[in-house]
C-alpha cells in the first residue's frame, strides 16, 4: 500500500498536533525521542522513507492508549501495522527477543506441518476430539516449554481451563490441528502469514464441529473475533473468552475461602481492545476472603506489560514493566492476577532481572484453586 493510501486509510491527515497520543504513550514516557505524533507528521509531510527505516517503528507496543484517546480518531495502531509491512520489505524488521524463537515457532506452525498438542492433558479431566465447544490453547504448550525457567507453568494453566469448564459441565473439544492464532504476525505487518494461520485454524475449527470457540489468551480471542472476519468473512462459530463464561455462570461455583489480598492487571487486549473490565472483577469478588485492591492505573487507563510481538524488548520495556510491578506492590497486595499468559511471561522476565517481585496467577488458575473439591477441602 502506498504511503498516501496509508495516511488516508488511518486518518493520519486529521492529526492536529495536540500531542495527546505522545503524552499518553508509555514508551514516550521513558524514551522522550519516541513520539507517535511526530511519526505521523513525518508521513503526512511526505517523509515516509524516514519512517520506513526508523528502528522505533518496532518499539510501539500497540497497547492502544494513543488511539483510544485521540480526539480526531487517528488510527495510529493501524498506521504502525501497515508501515511495518513497508519496513519489512525494505529490510527493517526490528530486533527479535529470545533469539527469534517465537517467530520461528509461528513460521513452523504456518508451514502446514501436522500438530500434536494434546500431550499436556492431565488424567481425570474430560475433553474430546470433536464437539460444539472447542477450547483453543494456541501457542500455550510451546510457550510452556520455552519459559519453564520463569517459574511459570503454562501447561497447568491449560489444565486449569479444562478443569473449570468441566465444573460448568462443559467437556471441551481439543484440536490437534489448531495453530498459532496469528496475532503477532498481524501486528508485525506480515499479513500473508497471518492469513495462512487464520485459514488453517478455521479449517481445524470446522473439522472439530465447533459452534463456540473458547479462548484462554485475550490476544487470540481479540484477533479471531475482530480480525479474522475482515479477512475471511463471517465466522461459523461464536468466539468467547473463558473469563466471560465463568462470570456469566458464577453461581455454578461453590468457592472455598482464599484469604489473600489481590490486585488485577488489565491487559491491553482484554481491556482497551475488548472492554472486558467488569467480568474479571466480578469473579475475584465472588471468592470468599479474597480482597481486591486496585492499582492507581486500572481499567482503560491500565499500563501495558511493556512488550509486544516479541520484538524490540530493551531497557524501555523493562522500565515500563518495573513501573507496573511497583504499582502492584504499592497496593499492598500479595498476589497479582491477570488474564493474559503473555503478560505473566513479560512480568516474570522483568522480575528475573531485578524488578519488584510479587506472586502472579492467571485468573482461570485462581478459579481452579478456589473451586471446592469433592472431599470438601
Image: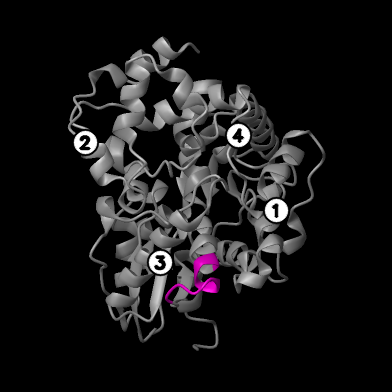
Whether residue 37 sits left or right of residue 100 in the image: it is left
- How much space separates mark 3 and mark 4, taking CA atoms? 26 Å
- Residue bearing the label numbered 2: 19
- Residues marked 2 and 4 touching at CB (< 8 Å): no
Towards the viewer: 2 or 180: 2
Highlighted magenta segment, given as a residue range: 349-356
Q: Earlier in the sequence, mark 3 or mark 2?
A: 2
Q: Quadrant of residue 75?
A: top left
Instruction: Assign a secondary structure to mark 1.
Output: loop
- Residues marked 3 and 4 touching at CB (< 8 Å): no
Whether residue 286 sits left or right of residue 212 in the image: it is left
- Residue bearing the label numbered 3: 322
Mark 4 is surrounded, within 10 Å at the Cα level, by few (under 14), some (14 to 19) or many (20 or more) other residues, namely: some
Q: Earlier in the sequence, mark 3 or mark 1?
A: 1
In the image, what residue occupies the spot 26% across and 67% down?
295
Mark 1 is surrounded, within 10 Å at the Cα level, by few (under 14), some (14 to 19) or many (20 or more) other residues, namely: few
Give residue 128's mark. Answer: 1
Towards the viewer: 145 or 198: 145
- How much space separates mark 2 and mark 1, taking CA atoms? 52 Å
Question: Which marked residue is nearer to the observer: mark 1 or mark 4?
Answer: 4
Query: Up-down: is 246 above or below 153?
Result: above
- Residues marked 3 and 1 touching at CB (< 8 Å): no
Where is residue 369 drawn, in percent x and y? 50, 77
- How much space separates mark 3 and mark 2, taking CA atoms? 25 Å
Query: Residue 344 in magenta?
Result: no
Q: Earlier in the sequence, mark 1 or mark 4?
A: 4
Whether residue 44 sits left or right of residue 54 in the image: it is left
- Residues marked 1 and 4 touching at CB (< 8 Å): no
- How much space separates mark 2 and mark 4, taking CA atoms? 27 Å
Mark 3 is surrounded, within 10 Å at the Cα level, by few (under 14), some (14 to 19) or many (20 or more) other residues, namely: many
Give residue 93's mark. Answer: 4
Amino acid at each position: 500500500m502506498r504511503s498516501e493510501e496509508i495516511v488516508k486509510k488511518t486518518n493520519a491527515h486529521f492529526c492536529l498536533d495536540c500531542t495527546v497520543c505522545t503524552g499518553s504513550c508509555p514508551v514516550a514516557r521513558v524514551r522522550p525521542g519516541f513520539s507517535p505524533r511526530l511519526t505521523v507528521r513525518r508521513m503526512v509531510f511526505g517523509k515516509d522513507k524516514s519512517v520506513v527505516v526508523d528502528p522505533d517503528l518496532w518499539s510501539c507496543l500497540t497497547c492502544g492508549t494513543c488511539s483510544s484517546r485521540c480526539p480526531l480518531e487517528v488510527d495510529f495502531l493501524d498506521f504502525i501495522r501497515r508501515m511495518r509491512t513497508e519496513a519489512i520489505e525494505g529490510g527493517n524488521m526490528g530486533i527479535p527477543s529470545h533469539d527469534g524463537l517465537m517467530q520461528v515457532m509461528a513460521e513452523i506452525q504456518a508451514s502446514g506441518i501436522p500438530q500434536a498438542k494434546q500431550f499436556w492433558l492431565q488424567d481425570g479431566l474430560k475433553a474430546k476430539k470433536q464437539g460444539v465447544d472447542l477450547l483453543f490453547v494456541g501457542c500455550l504448550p510451546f510457550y510452556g516449554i520455552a519459559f519453564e525457567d520463569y517459574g511459570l507453568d503454562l501447561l497447568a494453566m491449560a489444565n486449569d481451563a479444562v478443569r473449570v469448564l468441566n465444573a460448568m459441565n462443559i467437556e471441551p473439544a481439543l484440536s490437534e490441528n489448531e495453530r498459532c492464532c496469528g496475532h503477532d504476525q498481524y501486528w508485525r505487518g506480515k499479513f500473508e502469514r497471518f492469513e495462512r494461520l487464520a485459514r488453517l485454524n478455521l479449517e481445524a475449527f470446522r473439522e472439530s464441529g465447533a459452534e463456540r470457540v473458547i479462548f484462554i489468551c485475550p490476544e487470540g480471542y481479540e484477533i479471531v473475533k475482530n480480525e479474522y472476519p475482515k479477512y475471511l468473512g463471517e465466522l461459523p462459530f461464536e468466539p468467547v473468552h473463558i473469563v466471560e463464561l465463568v462470570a456469566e455462570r458464577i453461581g455454578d461455583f461453590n468457592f472455598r475461602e482464599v484469604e489473600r489480598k489481590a490486585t488485577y492487571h488489565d491487559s491491553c487486549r482484554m481491556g482497551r481492545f475488548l472492554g472486558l473490565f467488569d467480568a474479571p472483577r466480578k469473579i475475584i469478588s465472588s471468592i470468599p476472603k479474597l480482597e481486591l485492591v486496585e492499582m492507581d492505573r486500572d481499567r482503560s487507563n491500565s499500563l501495558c506489560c511493556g512488550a509486544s510481538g516479541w520484538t524490540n524488548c530493551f531497557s524501555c520495556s523493562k522500565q515500563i514493566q518495573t513501573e507496573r510491578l511497583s504499582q502492584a506492590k504499592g497496593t499492598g497486595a500479595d498476589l497479582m492476577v491477570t488474564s493474559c499468559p503473555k503478560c505473566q511471561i513479560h512480568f516474570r522476565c522483568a522480575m528475573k532481572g531485578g524488578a519488584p517481585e510479587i506472586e502472579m496467577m492467571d485468573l482461570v488458575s485462581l478459579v481452579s484453586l478456589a473451586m471446592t473439591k469433592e472431599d470438601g477441602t
